[in-house]
Amino acid sequence: MITTSRGNASPPPEHLVLEQLATVARALAQPHRLLLLTILAQGERSVETLAEAAGLKLGNTSQHLHRLQRAGLVTSRKDAQRVVYQLSDEAAVVVLAILRQIAERNLAQMSVIAQKYFHERDPLEPVSREELRRRIRKDTVTIIDVRPAEEFAAGHLPGAINVPTEELERRLRKLPRDKEIIAYCRGPYCLMSYEAVETLRRRGFKAIRLQDGYPEWKAAGFPVEAGNAP
Amino acid sequence: MITTSRGNASPPPEHLVLEQLATVARALAQPHRLLLLTILAQGERSVETLAEAAGLKLGNTSQHLHRLQRAGLVTSRKDAQRVVYQLSDEAAVVVLAILRQIAERNLAQMSVIAQKYFHERDPLEPVSREELRRRIRKDTVTIIDVRPAEEFAAGHLPGAINVPTEELERRLRKLPRDKEIIAYCRGPYCLMSYEAVETLRRRGFKAIRLQDGYPEWKAAGFPVEAGNAP
DNA sequence: ATCATGTTCCATAGATTAGTGGAATATATT
DNA sequence: AATATATTCCACTAATCTATGGAACATGAT
């Protein structure tokens, strides 16, 4: 009798494929690595600055980065003594967005966190990317990027000015009181833009957050600028 | 001095969010669970039939399903004695597609597997979903769904006829020799449609595969039918 | 009530993983 | 050559995960 089943030899090709997908998923299955990915989504970085930004030990960071690299999520290049990592793919930003979507829609605890620490802090609906692009064309807004200077330099929204949260109070005088101010940062669950609009509104500015953050703007194919324009 | 850093109390909200995302990713980080998801992507199923389809022990399957449920990827409902699971979200299909994309583009081993077991077996470019929809309208194709009857009944492409691979040889007479035959199955890394077009071409039919499979067709928002039309 | 069916729960053993401290390595700089 | 800087490698511990067999539980049929 002819049979389509295989003996007790090697696993079927379908399973080999699933094994590969699981390798990618395993790399995503750890909060610290997800954190490293969200930091890399802002722009490339060396191991040391990554470790510092993530609050991790150097060796530990190095290990995590290797795991991410083996999973095809990041690539590295050597720049003199240092090793610079970057996302290998916009797909990494997309997969994070989908994990977020699944968690938001189906995990009770996620709703609680989103409500308590985020929505409650800024109940106003953020501006959508499309809407912001329209307003940029009409020049009716001021956009502030509240991420650290390093990340701003690696890439930002066209025309945005960099005002890291720590400097915000100090630089209020330079912000316009007539135009609406739109703030953005690393992503939808980054508190920096929340803090910024809170501060600004308290001081009488008209401020609102952008939907998501820089990586999502870029991944959506919207225009970006790089460099350290003041 | 006022500081924005927190003492040694609870982790920052951003980390709570990453913890949730990691929960979802951890559920995806195991080949057997990915297999269960691809089976559920064909339609809802009871624990027992899932275990059988996946080749897993019952208790083990039950445990995996709970993990998937806690991660918000599937939901269950009770139907008399049996418990029926289904995907909670089309997002599950999307996340599998992205993991696949990342693996394909960045993992050397994935390319080897894809080449050796899939591309080599059918070097012809598959028909895209858009192209197939056009041809359906013109009625210039016969579509065969080579998945098991159970999965066909749960949902299939409009007008497709169900010819499970084991029955293909037996039912060749009923297939047209003038029209092109388009075969599809569970997804891009499911061998059933590869086997089918191979058999058909050997017998002189004009056969070609559809890009991806049923779950991707449905997730793309294309029309589907359900029920057991012959 | 009793039995059959389908699913979950529990304890356990083996494998994998995360974090740590420190040694080893590679590349500039002096 | 010697030193400083940036990263990786290694050994080890604690925690988590997977699969297994079997007991327990719920539901419907007899």
Image: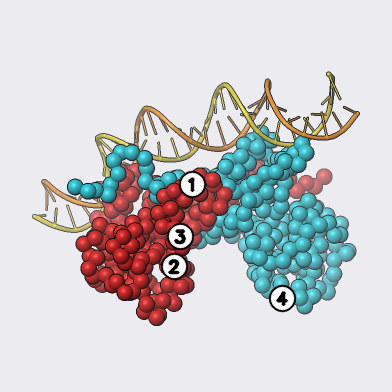
Chain colours: A cyan, B red, C orange, D yellow
Q: Which residue is mark 1?
A: B112
CB within 8 Å, label 2 to label 4: no
- Which mark, by number, is residue B127? 2
The answer to whether residue B43 is left or right of residue B116 is: left
Q: Residues within 10 Å of mark 3 (few under 14, many from 20)?
A: many
| Whether residue B67 is visible | no
Can residue A7 be seen here? The reply is yes
Three-letter residue code for mark 3? Val
Q: Which marked residue is nearer to the observer: mark 2 or mark 4?
A: 2
Disc 1 residue type (three-letter):
Val
- Which comes before the other along the chain, label 1 or label 2? 1
> Subunit of mark 3?
B
Q: Residue B78, position in %: x, y?
A: 30, 58
Q: Residue at x 43, y 75 (%)?
A: B133
The residue shown at (80%, 69%) is: A142
Q: Which residue is mark 4?
A: A134
